[in-house]
Amino acid sequence: MTKKRKSEQRRPAKPPDGNAAQYEQSLKETLSAERYSLCLYITGTTRRSALAISNIRALCEEFLPGRYDLEVIDIYQQPVKTMNEQVIAVPTLIKRFPKPVKRLVGDCSDRTKLMVALGLPPMTVTDASTSIQP
């Protein structure tokens, strides 16, 4: 049994027909189709909770349409789940998938921080004019 070098282990196999452009396109489509699993911890029906929900949904609908699952958990209704996740401040957004797991505390009105936490490409200067509700 021969050992492969680390660089050989990470590199995906080339397509059998040798068409690299087609293979790269297929890889991009696979990565762009990756589904996001998000969990938002809130406190009841407060203004801050409603703001966090609307900010996250707006960003996800813009950048991840049809590719995300958002579970909203009220810490008053599900305290055990909150303790298991070790949530100590709310609202808290937890991105479970794709890895790595990330946490963001606050109402998610800072669009740049939210995009970084979700692993989305940063906004360009022209995108900065569209902001999430303060």
Image (tube, rainbow, N blue to C red):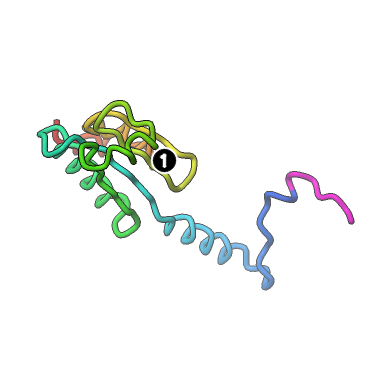
Quarter of the view holding residue 115 = top left
Q: Is residue 3 magenta?
A: yes
Quarter of the view holding residue 35 = bottom left
Q: Residue 1: image x %, image y %?
A: 89, 56
Q: Residue 63: image x %, image y %?
A: 30, 49
Q: Is residue 40 visible?
A: yes
Looking at the image, residue 104 sits to the left or right of residue 109; the answer is right
Residue at image location 41% in from the left, 40% down from the top: 119
Outermost residue on the top side: it is: 88
Residue at image location 38% in from the left, 51% down from the top: 36
Q: Is residue 124 visible?
A: no
**Residue identified by numbered label 1:** 119
Going by the numbered disc 1, the residue's amino acid type is Gly
Outermost residue on the right side: it is: 1
Disc 1 secondary structure class: loop
Q: Residue 125: image x %, image y %?
A: 28, 33
> Badge 1, how many Cα within 10 Å: few under 14, some, many 20+?
some
Q: In the rendered structure, which segment of residues is drawn in magenta?
A: 1-7
Looking at the image, residue 124 sits to the left or right of residue 21; the answer is left
On screen, residue 118 above or below 23: above
Residue at image location 49% in from the left, 44% down from the top: 99
